[in-house]
Amino acid sequence: MSTVVDTKSVETFHERGYLVVDSVFSDADLQPAIDELTGEVNRRARALVEQGQLSQTYEEAGFERQLALISRETDELAVSIWNGVLSGPGIFHILSHPALLDIAEVFCGPEIIASSVYRLRPKIPNYGYGAVPWHQDSGYLEPYCDDALVITVWLPLVHADESNGCLWVIPGSHRFPVAKHRLHASGKYLEIANDDLPPGEPVVCPVPKGGVLLMTNRTIHGSYENASDIVRWSMDLRYQSAALPTNAAITRLENEDVPSVSTGVPAACYPPEADFLVRSLKRREEVIRTPEAFDALRRNHRPSDVTNRWGVNWVAPKIDA
Ligand SMILES: O=C(O)CCC(=O)C(=O)O
């Protein structure tokens, strides 16, 4: 059992569809990822300076401000590291951190798949595309997984609050079926139109650095622009039981879903990206334990399409590991 999520918190999560948990990570836990991202920003900034697209690298501004200053001149760098493009050891360290897996185990059981959909979001100040319209993660996933629990862990690498565009959720919205999604005007996101939202007052979910916001795949959530002067760095990770459809190359156990066209079980809840077994009692030797193995599985993954359930022209981001 997790030491940070007790029985009462589990009840709250199931009742409201979300839960903020403070103090999951220490600064030392997050620092390798922050160093990795800083190194990547520096590397890409130097290249842009050399190409004459950026006046300076702004390295002295530090993690929270550097990309904000760069983005006043060009958004190319921020856009280039959006999504799950980076997958170094610091990021793997977070994805497979025991404190996080203890939380995932409370909700998903002991055989845990880190879902393929992992995103890094450096939300830069006053940037329109940073705002994410109302949606359920299930809007992006295979319909088969609508009634299963794929838990989203939203994890800021800086203190996140209303001023820098933290998440908002509609409490209780996870108890409604998956709402109709349509293509957002930006073409980058799916969204639920205001008229299709279930009843409920949205609540803002500030999360301190080191904390996480947990949501179900049916919890309606979104975020507004970052109106501060720092970058709202965050990651969103997803975990599910290994009994659900998964493209991780693991032994299937009795009563676990086996992908099949005839039974309608899809290749994974989100087939475009690579799942991996991150904790297991029954398949210990199949757990991905090193950043090198993580990187290799991402490189070797053959993406397959997700069902176009909304009949729109939304194209899953292509993640080049
Ligand atoms: O980070 C954000 O602003 C949006 C995140 C999100 O929509 C998600 O994690 O599903």
Image (spheres, helix red, strand yellow):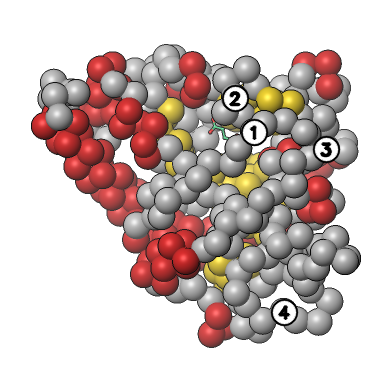
Q: Amino acid at mark 1?
A: Trp
* Res 219 seen here: no
Tag 3: Cα neighbours inside 10 Å, few (<14), some, or many (≥20)? many
Q: Amino acid at mark 4?
A: Arg
Q: Residue at 32% across / 28% down in the picture?
A: 76
Q: Amino acid at mark 2?
A: Gly
Tag 2: Cα neighbours inside 10 Å, few (<14), some, or many (≥20)? few
Instruction: State if disc 1 and disc 4 touch (CB < 8 Å).
Output: no
| Mark pair 4, 1: CA separation | 32 Å
Q: Earlier in the sequence, mark 2 or mark 3?
A: 3
Q: Earlier in the sequence, mark 4 or mark 1?
A: 4
Q: Which residue is mark 3?
A: 178
Q: Earlier in the sequence, mark 3 or mark 1?
A: 3
Instruction: State if disc 3 and disc 4 touch (CB < 8 Å).
Output: no
Q: Quadrant of ligand 1?
A: top right
Q: Which residue is mark 1?
A: 314
Q: Amino acid at mark 3?
A: Val
Horizontal placement of 114 versus 210: left or right?
A: right
Q: Quadrant of residue 29?
A: bottom left
Tag 4: Cα neighbours inside 10 Å, few (<14), some, or many (≥20)? few
Q: Is mark 2 within 8 Å of ligand 1?
A: no
Q: Secondary structure at mark 1?
A: loop
Q: Earlier in the sequence, mark 2 or mark 1?
A: 2
Horizontal placement of 113 versus 32: left or right?
A: right
Q: Earlier in the sequence, mark 4 or mark 2?
A: 2
Q: Position of residue 67 (x, y in %)?
A: 29, 28
Q: Nearer the viewer, mark 4 or mark 2?
A: 2
Instruction: State if disc 1 and disc 2 touch (CB < 8 Å).
Output: yes
| Mark pair 2, 3: CA separation | 20 Å
Q: Which residue is mark 4?
A: 252
Q: Secondary structure at mark 2?
A: loop
Q: Quadrant of residue 92?
A: bottom left
